Every structure is written in structure tokens, then in C-alpha cells.
Amino acid sequence: MTEALPIDALPTDLLFHIMSLYANFQLKEFFNLRLVCRRFRDVAVTEWHTFDFSSTLQCSHFLTDDRFLRLISRCKNLQFVNLANCYQLTVKSLRALAGSPHIQYLGLNYMSQFTDRDLLWLHKLTELKSLHLYGCNVSAPLLMTIAKHCRQLQFLDLTSNRFPLTAALEALPPLCPDLRDLRVAGVQEVRDTLLLGLAEHCKRLTHIDIGHAKVTDHGVQTLVGACHDLESLSCPFCPLGDDTLAALAQCHNLKTLSLGHCLHPTRPFTMPTLVRVLRANPTLETLNLADAGGLSLEDLMLHWNRDQPPTAPSPLAKLRTLILPAKPVDPTAVERLIWAAPEIQLCILGDEDQSKRLPGLSRLCNILL
């Protein structure tokens, strides 16, 4: 009979894996295992590298400074920390994270109570790759400091930041050339200079959200022409014209295209241009063209069938969400849409009463205004 291996003889990484499987990778269950024995306790508090409190509704009430500080006091290998909506935490807890230099993901969404002084320690996280500051208010000097020290940043979310960040955003691309995902919707004074910098220095960019930005067709076209791996482009409420829509035919991997409320005064989007973009991007899953000129579902289906071989695969095969300007909808066009986009789940078009009467729409999961 094989002699049992003492628990102290098990390699730490193997024991951590066994404990994680038992706890189903849940923090609470994992930490309860520290009560089993001294070795379990040591592994539980030193090897755990993920704190994600954002998905549990009770965390905002449960997680206080005392509890959080006890949790991280001996965790030196933290790599993933998400504290979104943990409103009971104070700057005391945040500054303690500066002692975890290996953090690569930090989520502080909706933590608007903290000031620049409270967040200045962020520049110490030099291995940071993903920084989520949705709804926080970060000044341009602080953003510049973070960019200078956190040169490995790949994801940055500054959505709804209330401070003007023009100078810092213009300096961001050369400081963080690995940037893949930038979200600055609602940020004041976002201009073409940011897009031109991204086009020059961040050619591996895949996602960008610049809703309400003061950008022009030239800036967006330059970005699209340089970033060939673009998967998501969101520019709602930007005055872009049909020539910019045409430039998107250069992309071949788009999954999300949001151009809602982009009403150019002289060059509105046209359906032939849209169809060319759709055919160039068969990976598209979400298309938002709400209030974007004279586009309609009927025109889309009419142009779609033109010069389209009946046996050819539909480039809309992966489309799940479609938002078009509210116009009267022909039931025949709806049937054609369901055939062309069999995966569609959310369709927003026409008025609600009319949509409910249209045959075929019962297949969709949701009909909204």
C-alpha cells in the first residue's frame, strides 16, 4: 500500500489548485478552508490572487475597511481586484493596495467619492494592464502620472469623467502603446488629436468608445485606416458623414458598431454604404444606427437582396442586436431580416404597438422603442 503523502509535502501550487477546485474558485468558500489546518490557512491567505466583489450585491454592505484590510494583509500575489460599488471602503483600503505591486486588473467603477489625492498611489502599480474608472473623476495631471508609470496599460475606462482631459489624453498613446481598449464616452473635450495619436502609436487597438466627442470625419477615418484589428467602434452623438461610414469597409473584424444619433448636416449615412460595411464585416453582432438619418429596415433588406446570390452565406448571420431609426415597418422586411440574421435577439425599430403586430417578431427576445 502506497504511503500517504503528508500535506506539508504537497507543492504550494498543487495545494492551491486542489483548494480552488473544492471551493469552486469562490473567495468566501476558499477562505473558509483556512480553518482546516495551518497549511491550508497559509495557502489561503498568501496564494489567492483574485478579489472580485463587484458581482455580489451584498458586498457593498459586507466589505468594510477592517474586513478588506484583514483579507489583503498577507496576500502578496494579488493580480485581479474589482471593488466596483464597494461604497463603504475609504481611502485607507485603497492605499493599502499600493503594497500589491503585481496587480494587473483594478476595477474602481462608480467610486466617485475619491479625489486625485486619494488615487495618487495608482502610479505605483507598474504592472497594471486594465484600469476601470467608470464614473470616477480623475484630473488630467493624475491621468498623466498614471500613464507615465503604468506603461503596460491595455484597457482604460474613463467613461463619464467630469474633468477635461484633453492634454492627458493627447499624451496617452505614446506613453501606453499597448493600449487595446479605450473608453472615454462623455469625457469633455475629446478631439481628433487623441484619435491621430492612437492611429500612430496604438495600432493594435481593438475597442474604442468616444461618444459625445468633438471629433471629425478626418480623425475617425485616420484611426480606422491605421487600426486594422478594430472590433468595436462606438461614436454616438458625433457628427460623422457617409464618407466615414464608407471607411469602415476597410475593417473586417467589427463586432460592435454604434453610430446612433450621428446626424451630419450635409452628408448623412446612405444605405448602399451601410451594406458595403456589413458585407465587409460578417462578424458584426451589434449595430446601432438610432436616429441616424433616412435609414430604414425596408431599405436595408432591399439593398441586401440586390446582387446577393441566393446561395451565398448571409453576412448578418452573427447579428444579435439591431437598432434603426423609428419608422413604419413592413412585415415582409421583418421576415427577410429573420432569414438574413437568424441569431438576432434584440430589435429596436418602429413604434412599440406596431412592432407587437408584426408577424415573425415573436421569435425575437425583445422589442423596444
Image (cartoon, rainbow, N blue to C red):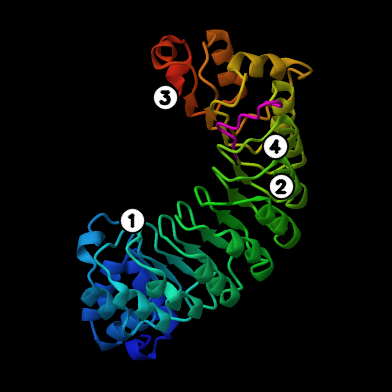
Q: Earlier in the sequence, mark 3 or mark 1?
A: 1
**Residue 350 position (above or below residue 251):** above
Q: Position of residue 14 (x, y in %)?
A: 43, 79
Question: What is the distance, in whole Å, between disc 3 and disc 2 at their CAs?
Answer: 33 Å
Q: Which mark is residue 277?
A: none
**Residue 288 position (above or below residue 34):** above
What residue does disc 2 label? 219
Check if mark 4's residue and mark 2's residue have beta carbons within 8 Å.
no
> Residue 269 or 296: which is nearer the viewer?
269
Q: Which mark is residue 55?
A: 1
Camera-side mark, 4 or 2: 2
Q: Position of residue 127 (x, y in %)?
A: 54, 76
Magenta residues, as a range? 257-268
Residue shown at the point (70%, 23%) measured from the top left: 270
Q: Which amino acid type is shown beneath numbered disc 4?
A: Asn
Camera-side mark, 3 or 2: 2
Asked whether residue 6 is in view, the answer is no
